[in-house]
Image: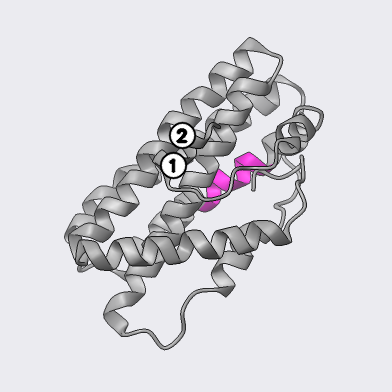
């Protein structure tokens, strides 16, 4: 992804170029991890709805995303079956776990949702960037098209989480929190070596 495209997403650190090369030779592993990422995305949206049922705009916005994310899992699983791959066990996501470790403690109760939305937006933005790399770097035309569609979807989800935050918090507060999380993500990425068997 170019510097301009990273800027559009807000990301401060581009993915290590070696990642796409590693992923291209670990296709079964990357598809398996991608499948579980889609499951987790659906689960996270359900969790937000369960925790904040009084936020009507959030419930309305995320309800269809649950269906979409599960549909994405089914798409990835169909691609895996077509290639004779098996799903295997869910893998630990060090990237997401390290982000979660930086969740601010002792924040006012009404700001808990803000940071949850920022983390979700960040994961979607990074996934979008990774899907773009796959859509450009994989050898198979069908897989490049496959991942281009996912890239477009993740870009929309990233914007949705930001827009939801802006419905519940002043724009200045959202922008400050977003910059804070972008800085945190840069620190997290510096701790992680590129792995071709993981989406993040």
Residue 93, placed above or below residue 200: below
Q: Where is residue 77 in the image (x, y as percent from the top left)?
A: 62, 32
Q: Which residue is drawn at 64% across and 48% down?
A: 200
Outermost right residue? 25
* Residue 93 visible in image: no
State yes or no: discs 2 and 1 in contact (Cβ < 8 Å).
yes
Residue 19, placed above or below residue 97: above
Q: Residue at x 71, y 15 (%)?
A: 139
Q: Name the residue under label 2.
A: 5
Nearest the eye: 191 or 195: 191
Q: Residue at x 68, y 28 (%)?
A: 80
Q: Position of residue 183 (x, y in %)?
A: 51, 63
Q: In which quarter of the image is residue 53?
A: bottom left
Q: Is residue 38 magenta?
A: yes
* Residue 149 visible in image: yes
The label on residue 35 is none
Q: Position of residue 194 (x, y in %)?
A: 75, 46
* Region of the chain picked out in magenta, as a range: 33-40
- Residue 136 located left or right of residue 52: right
| Element at label 2 | helix
Q: Mark 1 points at which residue?
A: 7
Outermost top residue? 141
């Amino acid at each position: 992804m170019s510097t301009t495209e990273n800027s559009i997403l807000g990301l401060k650190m581009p993915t290590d170029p070696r990642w796409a090369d590693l992923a291209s030779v670990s296709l079964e592993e990357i598809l398996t991890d991608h499948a579980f990422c889609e499951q987790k995305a659906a689960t996270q949206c359900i969790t937000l709805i369960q925790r904040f049922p009084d936020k009507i705009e959030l419930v309305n916005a995320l309800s269809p995303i649950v269906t979409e994310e599960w549909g994405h899992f089914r798409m990835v699983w169909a691609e895996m079956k077509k290639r004779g791959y098996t799903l295997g066990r869910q893998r630990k996501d060090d990237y997401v776990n390290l982000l979660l470790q930086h969740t601010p403690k002792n924040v006012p109760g009404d700001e808990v949702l803000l940071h949850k939305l920022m983390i979700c937006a960040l994961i979607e933005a990074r996934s979008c960037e990774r899907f773009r790399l796959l859509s450009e770097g994989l050898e198979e035309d069908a897989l490049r098209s496959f991942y281009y569609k996912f890239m477009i979807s993740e870009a929309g989800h990233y914007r949705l989480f930001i827009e939801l935050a802006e419905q519940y918090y002043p724009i200045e507060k959202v922008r400050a929190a977003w910059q804070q999380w972008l800085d945190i993500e840069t620190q997290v990425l510096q701790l992680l070596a590129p792995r071709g068997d993981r989406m993040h």
